[in-house]
Amino acid sequence: PGGSSRAQRDFVEAPPPVVFRRPGATEALPKETEHSHPAAAAAAATEATNMAQVTCDNWDGAAAVPPKDGQYMNVESPVTGEVIGRVAISSADDVAEAVARASAALGAWRGMTTKARAACMFRLHHLINEHKEELARLITLENGKNHTEALGDIAKGNETVEWACSLPQVSQGKVCTVSRGVHCMDTRKPLGIVAHIVPFNFPAMVPLWTLPIALAAGNCVILKPSEKVPLTFNRIAQLIAQAGVPPGVFQMVNGAVDAVNALCDHPEIAAVSFVGSSNIAELVYQRCRALNKRCLALGGAKNHLVALNDCDHEAAARDIAASAFGCAGQRCMAASVLLLVGDTGDLLDRVVAKAQALELGTESGKVGAIIDQRSRDKMHGYVDRAAESGAKILVDGRPGAARSPGYWFGPTVMVFTDKTQECLHDEIFGPVLSVLRVSSWEEAIEIENNNPYGNAASIYTSVGANAEWFCDRFRAGMLGVNIGVPVPREPL
């Protein structure tokens, strides 16, 4: 989740952003924190596991609000498989109450200057930094990320909070004199009440993609976190209130399908953003558009990495492994298919060696847990069927699924000769890399172009002209050169 389907992407004709890394360069590692050392990270994970169970009610901007029907569901930790809390299951009545509170708060909030609203985001940025260790422990507990990845989840989300602080400068309108005594002016005004529906895989970052900008622009926001990971934003909601955002301006409505439908259908909600699987993204988009409601719906992904023999083999192997197996492959930007063009020497051997060296766990540098048993079993099924169809399994992650307690799956590398094999086309959403050898650049482009998803593609090469050739022909929306997670940052 987090990609854009090709149908939605093709509405935008602007060239895709391209993220470059010069050959041989590596991304700076995060500075050590209090829990960056493996032993300290393990202690942090143990501390999080021993936390008392948390009840995640809805949130009105100042206090918790139990669901009107009194319905809850359990929240499990993928690290231990244990119940760590419970989350409210909201109805259309709960959504209607939240909208009524937002409507009452909207006038005063949108009447403030952009500078005053951005000041709340400035304070929120500081509070998130101040509580990042606490938030990282919650992310590890409910999502299964290792500690460094959890801190990255927070840091990347907080970058958008930081960017929202610039809205007083970047959101200014323009005035033009178009004739004698005639002026044209454009201004930006808030839509009103907007809703954000977010997935499990980044409990802090994905909600913060949209929330701080919507708030600083003068909108009232209703967030529906994933029912699988409600704890992190349950805590961030308190920090938003502490930052000075008034009651009713930011609210949370927890729940599942009924809450999503109610947010899409409510006539006073002017816009909806959604991040999740492609089939649900399409349903949300169609439901909103049927009501002439603005909707940004981001779906799944099947990202292709293309490697030429002229690439830096060691740097490429390191980056490919990080892209495929980081965050246990549960991210929309994860490498999923590696296309090796012609003879690529020992590149694949290097990728295999790095995959084999990875261990499972929540300590920094390890492969974290899978969100739930259903997802783990789905990955197991894909690898089983690949083996039965004749795929060559170079690294088998299935033994990792036997790890207990919790839900785990090890890094997996499989080589295919049949272009139609499902692992080369379906979004597996786990630490599974499917490899296919192709004979030409044109064949690699044909495979990438026929991909129904529109999220990311990358080329590994040391020749600038080669990189330009591929970037001109890729159809994905975000492109990388020598980087396997080509995420453009604000304001792109």
Image: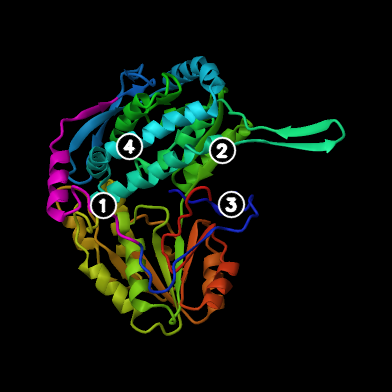
Q: Which residue is drawn at 29% across and 26% down?
A: 72
Spatial separation of the CA atoms under disc 2 and disc 1: 33 Å
Between marks 3 and 1 in the image, the one whose residue lies nearer the viewer: 1
User: Splitting the image into 4 quarters, where does residue 257 fall?
Assistant: top left
Tell me the amino acid under the disc marked 2: Gln
Mark before the other along the chain sequence, 3 or 1: 3
Q: Give the range drawn in magenta.
A: 28-56
Between marks 2 and 4 in the image, the one whose residue lies nearer the viewer: 2
Residue 80 magenta-highlighted: no
Tell me the amino acid under the disc marked 4: Ile
In this figure, which residue is indicated by the disc labeled 2? 169
Spatial separation of the CA atoms under disc 2 and disc 4: 23 Å
Q: Please, is residue 245 above or below residue 464 in the view?
A: above
Mark before the other along the chain sequence, 4 or 1: 4
Element type at mark 2: helix
Where residue 12 sits: x, y (%)?
63, 51
Where residue 222 sits: x, y (%)?
45, 27
Q: Please, is residue 317 above or below residue 173 in the view?
A: below
Tell me the amino acid under the disc marked 3: Arg
Q: Do the residues labelled 3 and 4 touch (CB within 8 Å)?
A: no
In this figure, which residue is indicated by the disc labeled 4? 128
Q: Residue at x 43, y 58 (%)?
A: 426
In this figure, which residue is indicated by the disc labeled 3? 9
In this figure, which residue is indicated by the disc labeled 1? 148
Element type at mark 4: helix
Where residue 97 sits: x, y (%)?
45, 16
Could you classify mark 1 by the number of other residues whose Cα lies within 10 Å: few (under 14), some (14-19), or many (20 or more)?
A: many
